[in-house]
Amino acid sequence: MKRSILITLIFIGTAALLLGLFFFAINQGSIQVSFAQLLRGLFVEYDPNVAAIYDLRFPRILVAILGGAALAVAGALFQAVLRNPVADPSIIGISSGAALASVLVIGLFPALYFSSPIFAIIGGLVTFGIVYALSYQGGLAPMRVVLVGIAVNAVLVGLGEGLGVIMGGGAGGGGVSFTGSLAMLTWSDVSLLAWYVTPALIAAALLSGRCNLLGLEDDTVRSLGVNVTTLRIMVSFVAVTLVSLASAVMGVIAFLGLIVPHVARLLVGSDNRVLLPYCALGGAFLMLLADTVGRLIAHPFEIHAGILMAIIGGPMFIMLLRSGKKFYG
Amino acid sequence: MAERTPRHPSLRPEDVSSSSRREQLRSSVETSPLLDLNAQEHARERAPENSKPIFEVRDLSFAYANQQVFEGLSFDIAEGKITALMGANGAGKSTLFKLLTKNLKPQGQAHIMLDGRDLNSYRLSELAKKLAVVWQNNIAPHDITVHDLVAYGRVPHKKAFQSMSHEDEAAIAEALKFCDLEGYEDRRMQELSGGQQQRVWIAMGLAQQTPIMFFDEPTSFLDVRYQVMVLRLIRRLNRELGLTVVVILHDINQSFELCDEVIALRPDGSLVKGSPQKLADEDFLRDIYEADLRVGMVGEQVVVHAPL
């Protein structure tokens, strides 16, 4: 039982890091407040500095936490469903599909802003369906999924950037863009994300035990009385939903859904009942870290979190490709 | 494997150790759901002579896209016996295996009756309580523990989000014990030898507590020491727990040695069925494998030999 204590400690440690980063991130920028002042300003009496922080920094921090958690959990689910160590939802085009649908809807029908996540999910699902169908040849070879996905992603990114030019930079409103930035987010983005992501994360937690079955051969799962195809579709649906929501609000953040599950698997093992909650925590941490570092590293300019993730994630992706390790779920 | 299984069960008198073991098994019936498989009827040292059919197959045909595998097969599989499916590569034994385990659908007017009911009418979850399958190719997460893997055998008995009960844990413990894996519960799959891993997969099937178990080439990829271990374990499943066993074995001698009955597919898709004693001759083997094999005796066991 030593291992379960170790895992508990890893959870507590990561949660503490996240909390520490949260308070650090709150206090970075032109306005700075003490911790006591912050608490007073939030809960006791009005403080103009705290109010500014509350309006400007809290939304992006909370979006980073929710969106990062969603992306990392989705990444772990994709890896389970596709039995593929390199099936990052942003590499195979699902994020782009969702972001494109979201940009289109908000650009053409701004009144539909609050239901834009629904369209993002539809965009993500359609993209996933296309990638899946195009790469299925009696089975899903990991490399074929990635190659087909990269091609699909290229088309979608092209369309998205083209649209961006046609519609003008501000057309997306609410911070929707392809480059994965968390600037200019408001509380309405937070509540939008929270309303949709929370149920999807709960669904992922409920499915986590079943997800473990996907680590076995399909024949074996079937002879345990479980319909593998139905299970795959359910897990895929939750994963696509999570990615699409995150992409609709944050834009495309590459590699986070790849890196976090891999590191998490090294730390807490491959049991999805433990892995998925840890991915949520780790994804929130990494996303917030990328956003905070991006905010500070070249002050007063801001480097988009998506760019930072790409710079860190690219080399890791190559390492994973080169290690060529068999993946089990 | 601690217990030695007799080479010739039919010639072997009851001995003290096995009957005391049987007492032990009987006495644990009340507490152990695993052994509650008509233990009174089946816990005997040899398979019954005339048992009723558990599978009744009528007019079974199957073709892949443009290739007929077999046509109009009819046969029974006896309850409480070990039946081997034999045949040359491509004769269709894997196809037959998949049809019987509902991994393929029969075509045309075929009937496959399992325990008096059309196999098609079984839902997957129902079927998983009726028959367990140990497949040839298995993968598992490398860091999964033996206990957690065997626990998957309880999936058919649970609703999707239900947690493990005492009954489940008892079934897992029984399965581990029967497969000689006590003390391995917390070991990880990657730490185990090939033979041990195979016993874990068998324990997983056993934890399903089904009256029937199917094995798809359970000895491939194992060296001979583990092959014998696995074959003895399969025989004990039949002799001690009364399970009906259907098995594909690549090795002709192992098929003859292990099984009470043989269902052999000819290359033309027709079928021969009988006991190993009746079938083990050179004509039969030429018929099935289209190869000239010699049959000899070592002691009282028929041995097939391929002269080069």
Image (tube, rainbow, N blue to C red):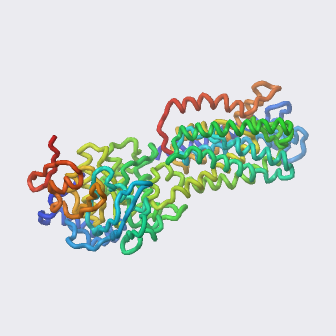
The answer to whether residue B78 is left or right of residue A128 is: left
Residue A54 drawn above or below residue B289: above
**Residue B107, picture quadrant:** bottom left
Whether residue B34 is visible, yes or no, is yes
Whether residue A54 is visible, yes or no, is no
Q: Nearer the viewer, residue B119 or A180?
A: B119
Residue A281 image position (x, y, % from top left): 64, 43
Residue B74 drawn above or below residue B253: below
Residue A275 drawn above or below residue B12: above
Residue A28 image position (x, y, % from top left): 79, 32
Q: Nearer the viewer, residue A45 or B249?
A: B249
**Residue A315, picture quadrant:** top right
Furthest-top residue in this view: A298
Report the number of numbered marks. Answer: 0
Residue B145 image position (x, y, % from top left): 43, 48
Residue B96 image position (x, y, % from top left): 35, 59
Residue at point 60% right, 38% down?
Answer: A258
Q: Nearer the viewer, residue B267 or A60?
A: B267
Residue A110 drawn above or below residue B171: above
Furthest-left residue in this view: B299
Residue at point 34% right, 69% down?
Answer: B57
Furthest-front residue in this view: B66
The answer to whether residue A253 is left or right of residue A321 is: right
Q: Nearer the viewer, residue B8 or A36?
A: B8
Residue at point 28% right, 51% down?
Answer: B88
